[in-house]
Amino acid sequence: MKRLMKKRIKAMAIDTVITMGVTAALEPLFRNKLKNKAAYDALAPSLIFWGLEYAQMRMSGQTIGHKMAGIVIDTTDGRALSSEQILKRLVHRDSISTISYLRDREKYDFYEGTKLPHDLYADTVVKEYFKEKMEPKL
């Protein structure tokens, strides 16, 4: 497995753990207010995950998991990520991206972890960043 893919998996795992914590903290507030508890159980984790990721990506361009893993999501043309790109990436990743990846894995292995199906769909690319390179040296 390529180094960048390992970092992507690490970032997703960190973001998932954070989302689980937020979901657990919010559960007492919302669970008793809803009539259909099964709907809460089915929808809340995904909506919270998407909401947290979207907010972090809009504010700083990275999630906490991305920062800890040392990766950044950028556009292929170098512009700032748009709201539309973030949403396209989230929805595609959590719906049909896995099927596309498994169907044509060799195509995505060529990119060595920089692009997966949801990145191609949203016109984004994942890059490693190194903190020492981003800070000016005096």
Image (cartoon, helix red, strand yellow):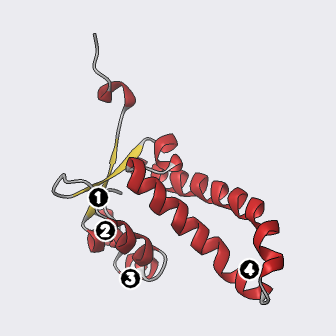
Name the disc covering residue 103, or none. 3
Amino acid type indicated by mark 1: Leu
How many marks do you count on the picture? 4
Which residue is found at the position 41% from the left and 55% from the top? Answer: 57
Q: Secondary structure at mark 4?
A: helix
Q: CA distance from mark 2 to mark 1?
A: 6 Å
Determine if residue 5 is in view: no
Q: Secondary structure at mark 3?
A: helix
Sequence-first disc among 3 and 4: 4
Please tell me in which quadrant of the rendered image residue 33 appears.
bottom right
Q: Which residue is mark 1?
A: 81
- Would you place residue 84 above or below residue 114 in this image? below
- Numbered disc in front, either 2 or 3: 2
Q: CA distance from mark 2 to mark 3?
A: 23 Å
Please tell me in which quadrant of the rendered image residue 12 appears.
bottom right
Q: Which residue is mark 4?
A: 41
Do tag 4 and tag 2 residues touch (Cβ < 8 Å)? no
Label 3 packing within 10 angstroms: few (<14), some (14-19), many (20+):
few
Q: Position of residue 70 (x, y in %)?
A: 43, 41
Sequence-first disc among 1 and 3: 1
Q: Which residue is mark 2?
A: 85
Sequence-first disc among 4 and 2: 4
